[in-house]
Image (tube, rainbow, N blue to C red):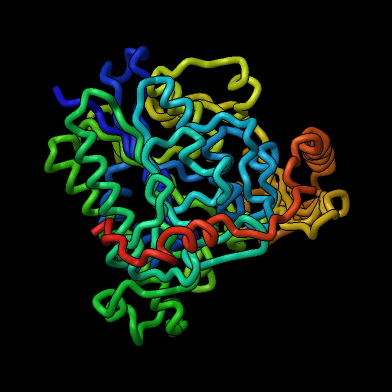
């Protein structure tokens, strides 16, 4: 019998070998998470124009978590996903200015899986610190194939920056610490390298974890090619004609979908499809919700539902009944404890203190299983330097299963009003008081953990320095990744 493969697109995982409700084989894990792709950017979610045939098929064959939430921006979500706790408790309150760096005191998902015997790899976007101590090769990843900063070609004061002059076509990528030139469009390059790496690992007895995190469809909006653009040029959606940037955005998503199809095809060819758990999610709300939002208010950087609501498709034909919805309120912080249960990884005292998420294993077996109410906190962060106290209620929300309190002045009943159109704060004073109390406690708890707020901003960007020391002098590296 072939070894199980668990894939998370976001995000993939398999379930604990000690649990008789799941297979005894230790799964491979693949987690795929695009950057800035929203709930409404999928055909199966009602978008009448977007071309996502592979995601649509995955949707139809999956257990779908329909109330799954992430952070409102990218580095925070990556931080929470890899640690099982709110990003502010990792010191991640921004995407730049040293405030994107994941505290060195945190244990990452990759480190946890290595203790369970896994080989680990990351392909695409890291965005949790560009200086060497914070790089993924020092945070549990054996194979690293990444760009710098929050996007290819971006650079900011301090350590957060990509290689100079980098572009979406033929980008310079940091492969196991060394800059290498690649050939092709960035999303294709990252998927191609990931599939090659997985194929090499597939014949080994040791399981692997592949974290595939393409930078697309994050801005700048650079189309992968005319063959994608022609699907959208001159088209309208909901009475709005697509601008050039909209065409590029949708083209980037269709290219991601095409690469997902290649990944799914590889699993089928290698006879791994039945015993593969495939999960798809995004890293924040969409950026083009004005075109199609799925009916939800807000977008990336906002504390409303549309800023945090993520797709979450889980397909595992051998173990999970597809074509079902799970309506439990779930989140990115649940992925690490779920994968611990999936793999049989052992809890340590530091992990028990760190992790605040819940294992989704009961819901994977029974989408209607009892799921206790909980509160989730959203805060967009990004306050000006030195203004922590003044930003307590700036772009924030705390919610339970039914209600969400936004900015401490708006209350929405998500059951009756999922589009968040009616502020009912005057009608539910007891609910407001309970949510305010929980939020005040959370705000107090995070204060000692905001370790990046006063971090100095170095004058030298490490990626620029590395580039000048290597490719900037000897411009002869062979292309990789295609």
Q: Residue at 35% across / 87% down in the picture? A: 234
Q: Residue at 31% across / 20% down in the picture? A: 22
Looking at the image, residue 442 lies above or below residue 224: above
Quick one: quadrant of the N terminus?
Answer: top left
Residue 39 visible: no
> Does 150 sit left or right of 116 as displayed?
right
Looking at the image, residue 468 lies above or below residue 26: below
> Does 50 sit left or right of 351 as displayed?
left
Q: Residue at 69% across / 55% down in the picture? A: 458
Q: Position of residue 292 (x, y in %)?
A: 48, 68
Residue 447 occupies which quadrant of the picture? Answer: top right
Residue 9 visible: yes
> Does 171 sit left or right of 468 as displayed?
left
Q: Position of residue 406 (x, y in %)?
A: 74, 52
Residue 435 occupies which quadrant of the picture? Answer: top right
The residue lying toward the viewer, choosing from 317 and 353, is: 353
Quick one: quadrant of the C terminus?
Answer: bottom left
The residue lying toward the viewer, choosing from 103 and 460, is: 460
Looking at the image, residue 138 lies above or below residue 238: above
Q: Residue furthest front?
A: 473
Q: Residue at 40% across / 41% down in the picture? A: 325
The residue lying toward the viewer, choosing from 39 and 467, is: 467
Q: Position of residue 289 (x, y in %)?
A: 52, 68
How many marks do you count on the picture?
0
Q: Position of residue 233 (x, y in %)?
A: 34, 84
Residue 85 occupies which quadrant of the picture? Answer: top right
């Amino acid at each position: 019998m072939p070894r199980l493969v668990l894939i998370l697109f976001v995000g993939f995982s398999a379930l604990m070998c000690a649990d008789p409700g799941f297979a005894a084989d230790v799964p491979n894990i693949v987690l795929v998470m695009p950057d800035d792709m929203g709930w409404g950017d999928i055909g199966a979610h009602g978008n009448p124009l977007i071309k996502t045939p592979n995601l649509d098929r995955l949707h139809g064959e999956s257990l779908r978590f329909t109330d799954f939430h992430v952070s409102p921006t990218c580095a925070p979500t990556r931080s929470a996903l890899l640690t099982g706790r709110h990003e502010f408790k990792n010191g991640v309150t921004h995407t730049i200015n040293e405030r994107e760096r994941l505290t060195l005191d945190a244990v990452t998902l990759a480190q946890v899986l290595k203790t369970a015997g896994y080989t680990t790899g990351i392909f695409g976007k890291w965005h949790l610190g560009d200086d060497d101590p914070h790089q993924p090769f020092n945070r549990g990843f054996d194979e690293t194939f990444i760009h710098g900063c929050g996007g290819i070609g971006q650079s900011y004061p301090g350590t957060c920056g990509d290689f100079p002059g980098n572009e979406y076509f033929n980008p310079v990528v940091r492969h196991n610490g060394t800059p290498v030139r690649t050939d092709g469009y960035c999303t294709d390059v990252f998927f191609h390298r990931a599939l090659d790496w997985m194929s090499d690992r597939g014949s080994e007895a040791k399981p692997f974890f592949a974290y595939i995190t393409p930078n697309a469809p994050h801005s700048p909006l650079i189309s992968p090619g005319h063959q994608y653009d022609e699907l959208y040029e001159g088209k309208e959606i909901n009475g709005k004609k697509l601008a050039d940037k909209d065409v590029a955005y949708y083209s980037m998503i269709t290219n991601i979908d095409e690469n997902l199809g290649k990944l799914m095809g590889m699993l089928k060819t290698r006879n791994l499809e039945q015993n593969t758990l495939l999960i798809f999610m995004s890293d924040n709300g969409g950026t083009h919700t004005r075109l199609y939002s799925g009916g939800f208010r807000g977008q990336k950087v906002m504390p409303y539902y549309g800023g945090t609501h993520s797709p979450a498709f889980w397909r595992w034909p051998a173990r999970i009944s597809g074509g079902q919805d799970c309506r439990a309120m779930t989140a990115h912080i649940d992925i690490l404890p779920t994968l611990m249960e999936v793999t049989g990884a052992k809890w340590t005292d530091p992990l028990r203190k760190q992790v605040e998420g819940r294992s989704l294993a009961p819901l994977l077996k029974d989408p209607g299983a009892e799921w206790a109410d909980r509160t989730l906190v959203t805060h967009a962060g990004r306050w000006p330097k030195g203004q922590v106290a003044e930003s307590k209620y700036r772009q924030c929300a705390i919610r339970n299963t039914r209600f969400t309190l936004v900015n401490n002045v708006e209350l929405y009943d998500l059951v009756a009003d999922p589009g968040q159109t009616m502020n009912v704060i005057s009608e539910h004073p007891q609910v407001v008081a309970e949510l305010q109390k929980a939020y005040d406690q959370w705000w107090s708890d995070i204060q000692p953990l905001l370790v990046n707020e006063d971090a100095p901003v170095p004058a030298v960007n490490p990626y620029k320095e590395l580039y000048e020391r290597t490719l900037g002098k000897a411009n002869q590296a062979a292309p990789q990744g295609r």
